[in-house]
Image (tube, grey):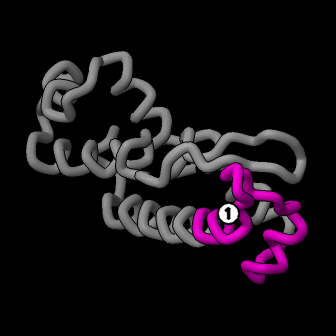
Amino acid sequence: MVNTIDMRLVRDKLNVISEQFAETLFLLKAKQNADGVSLVTRKEMAAAMRITPKSAVERIDGLIRFGLVEKLDDKSYKIVHTEVERTALGMVTGLIRVVSEQPDASYKRQAEALGITVKELEYVYETLVDLIR
């Protein structure tokens, strides 16, 4: 299945998402108080980044989904970490590289090449499928 996917399309999408995450994390850092809590509504996020409120919701939900941000309440967020490459999203980039270099590799060999378990590889593939939808 992966061999029939346009890897450039996936890479481009990963780059866009990474840029969006970086922009959103930058805003959250700018809004942090002394306790490290970012106080900002999704509407304020949308206005600051000049995007729709729906896009702001999608971005913050993505950051939460990938474990970069924790939602404390409707207008409070805490940055957990900022290293996108440590998330499943970052692992998709590694998976693309492994599949390109070793197109016939078994799931076990792909997982070994990425330094993860086969179970974790399943989650990386789920992320890849979500990206190409």
Look at the image and say whether residue 45 sits in the magenta stretch.
yes
Residue 18, image x and y in percent?
Answer: 48, 63
Q: Quadrant of residue 30?
A: bottom right
| Amino acid type indicated by mark 1 | Leu
Name the secondary structure under disc 1.
Answer: helix
Which quadrant is home to the N terminus? top left
Provide residue 103's location: percent of width, then percent of height.
Answer: 14, 40
The crowd level at tag 1 (other Cα within 10 Å; few <14, some 14-19, many 20+) is many
Residue 28 on the magenta segment? yes
Which residue lies at the image location 58% right of the left edge and 72% below the top edge? 23
Give the residue drawn at x 26%, y 25%: 116
Residue 104: x percent and y percent? 12, 33
Query: Please, which residue is most extreme toward the bottom here?
Result: 50
Is 3 placed above or below 7 here?
above
Q: Which residue bears the numbered disc 1? A: 28
The answer to whether 81 is drawn above or below residue 41 in the figure is: above
- What segment carries the magenta color? 25-52
User: Residue 121 occupies which quadrant of the picture?
Assistant: top left
Identify the residue at horizontal 19%, vertical 19% (top origin): 108
Residue 76, position as x, y percentages in the image: 81, 50
